[in-house]
């Protein structure tokens, strides 16, 4: 079902969704433009630099955690689920996931829908940084069944965001400041 859907989306949105970041482009982009740079922070030597001030690590192993447990796991490591603020950071995160899982499975990122009160819903990052960039997949967020309050990445293409039920198990990407 999903592959039929993806094919349809690609026909409809070829320029938007499918023209960039194909998997063969990933190996080149990640080798040349976003290479793995070891994190300079003590105890985080197996993490990677993310932009200037942070390090990042992707986790993809059973048991796949729901959203809250993923955020709690990142907090336990001194950080939060990753927030993403520009295209360069997006690609750093994409390449971190790509090196671990070139098959492009979904991962939780730090974006979630915060219920201020009944009719004011605002996307926020779990690390409380500003929402100043987005990279939604085509047609997302769609609030499917009114039950999609958390955000995963890698829908249809690398780095593309999708709102999803928070109880699903996913890989997750954590970031720490350095
Ligand atoms: C993206 O953000 C990083 C900080 O993580 C900054 O160093 C970099 O200059 C920004 N790049 C662009 C293209 O805005
Ligand atoms: C997730 O955590 C938030 C904030 O701590 C809490 O308000 C919410 O009820 C939790 N959701 C679930 C499904 O545990």
Image (cartoon, grey):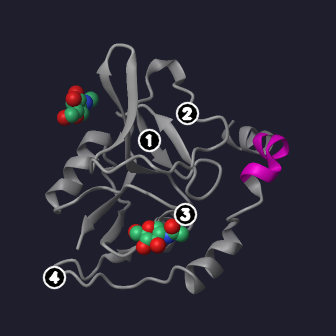
Q: Is mark 3 within 8 Å of ligand 1?
A: yes
Q: Secondary structure at mark 3?
A: helix
Residue topped by disc 1: 151
Between the C-alphas of marks 1 and 3, the distance is 17 Å
CA neighbours of label 1 inside 10 A, class few (<14), some (14 to 19), many (20+): many
CA neighbours of label 4 inside 10 A, class few (<14), some (14 to 19), many (20+): few
Q: Secondary structure at mark 2?
A: loop
Q: Which tag, 1 or 3, sits closer to the chain's start?
A: 3
Q: Can you see residue 100?
A: no
Q: Is residue 134 above or below residue 139?
A: below
Residue 58, percent from left and from top? 37, 64
Q: Which residues are magenta?
A: 9-17
95 sits left or right of 43 in the view:
right
Q: Which tag, 4 or 2, sits closer to the chain's start?
A: 4
Q: Which tag, 3 or 4, sits closer to the chain's start?
A: 4
The residue depicted at 41 percent of the width and 46 percent of the height is 131
């Amino acid at each position: 079902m999903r592959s039929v859907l993806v094919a349809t989306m690609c026909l409809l949105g070829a320029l938007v969704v499918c023209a960039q970041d194909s998997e063969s482009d990933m190996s080149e982009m990640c080798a040349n433009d976003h290479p793995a740079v070891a994190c300079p922070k003590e105890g985080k030597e197996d993490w990677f630099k993310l932009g200037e001030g942070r390090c990042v690590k992707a986790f993809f192993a059973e048991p796949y955690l729901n959203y809250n447990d993923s955020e709690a796991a990142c907090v336990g490591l001194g950080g939060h689920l990753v927030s993403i603020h520009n295209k360069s950071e997006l690609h750093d995160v994409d390449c971190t996931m790509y090196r671990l899982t070139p098959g492009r499975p979904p991962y939780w990122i730090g974006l979630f829908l915060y219920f201020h009160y009944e009719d004011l819903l605002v996307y926020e990052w779990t690390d409380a940084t500003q929402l100043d960039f987005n990279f939604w997949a085509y047609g997302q967020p769609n609030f499917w069944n009114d039950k999609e309050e958390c955000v995963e990445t890698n829908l249809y293409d690398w780095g593309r965001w999708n709102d999803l039920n928070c109880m699903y198990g996913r890989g997750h990407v954590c970031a720490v400041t350095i």
